[in-house]
Image (cartoon, rainbow, N blue to C red):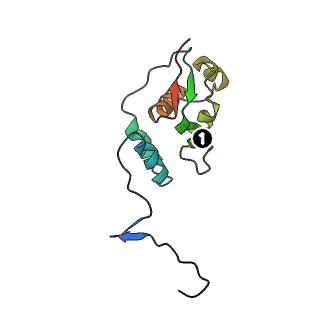
Amino acid sequence: MTKGTVPVRRAAYTGGTRQTGPAIQPGPSSILNQMQSSSPGSWSKTLNALINNAVGEIPADEVFMQTPQGALVATSMPAHLPDRLRMLLFLVNGRRRMSEYRDLLPRYRNLDDAFDMLAKKGFIKRVAAD
């Protein structure tokens, strides 16, 4: 190294894979970590793995709010969600009932499934009725 140069941090090389950060550990936040470290086309595999059964219709008076994790993902620049789900996550504010989302988005296909998926991923949660 010559005078005036800055040392470069090199990633560790481990048998054909580059590792620049800690390995993903299993746990509640591992789903978000997997989504963040996955390639742009592999999010669908992760989402499909989260869905085990079909969703019934969500009651019309159900209210959802964003979790802190959901607010982080909604505002992150490199999208960790498909655009349709990210747009829906932006609309969740903890005040609207499910019937209002249905009125607001009449052409949104599988709205109940989308809400269920966001809830399973921990981006939104149900608000307790008053």
Q: Position of residue 58 (x, y in %)?
A: 50, 19
Q: Residue furthest bottom?
A: 2
* Total tally of numbered discs in the picture: 1
Crowding at dot 1, Cα within 10 Å, few <14 / some 14-19 / many 20+, comes out as many
Image point (60%, 30%), residue name? 108
Q: Residue furthest front?
A: 3
Nearer to the camera, 13 or 39 = 13
- Amino acid type assigned to the residue bearing label 1 in the image: Ala
Nearer to the camera, 12 or 109 = 12
Pointer 1: what residue?
74
In the image, taking residue 13 as reference, residue 9 lies left or right, namely: right
Q: Is residue 2 above or below residue 90?
A: below
Image point (37%, 29%), residue name? 53
Q: Position of residue 17 (x, y in %)?
A: 38, 66
Instruction: Kindly indicate the quadrant of the structure image that contains residue 70.
Output: top right
Nearer to the camera, 115 or 19 = 19
Instruction: Kindly indicate the quadrant of the structure image that contains residue 74.
Output: top right
Q: Pick the quarter of the image with the C terminus.
A: top right
Image point (49%, 72%), residue name? 9
Q: Residue furthest right?
A: 104
Q: Position of residue 71 (x, y in %)?
A: 59, 38
Nearer to the camera, 61 or 124 = 124
Callout 1: SS? helix
Q: Position of residue 32 (x, y in %)?
A: 46, 44
Q: Residue furthest top?
A: 130
Q: Is residue 126 above or below residue 114?
A: above
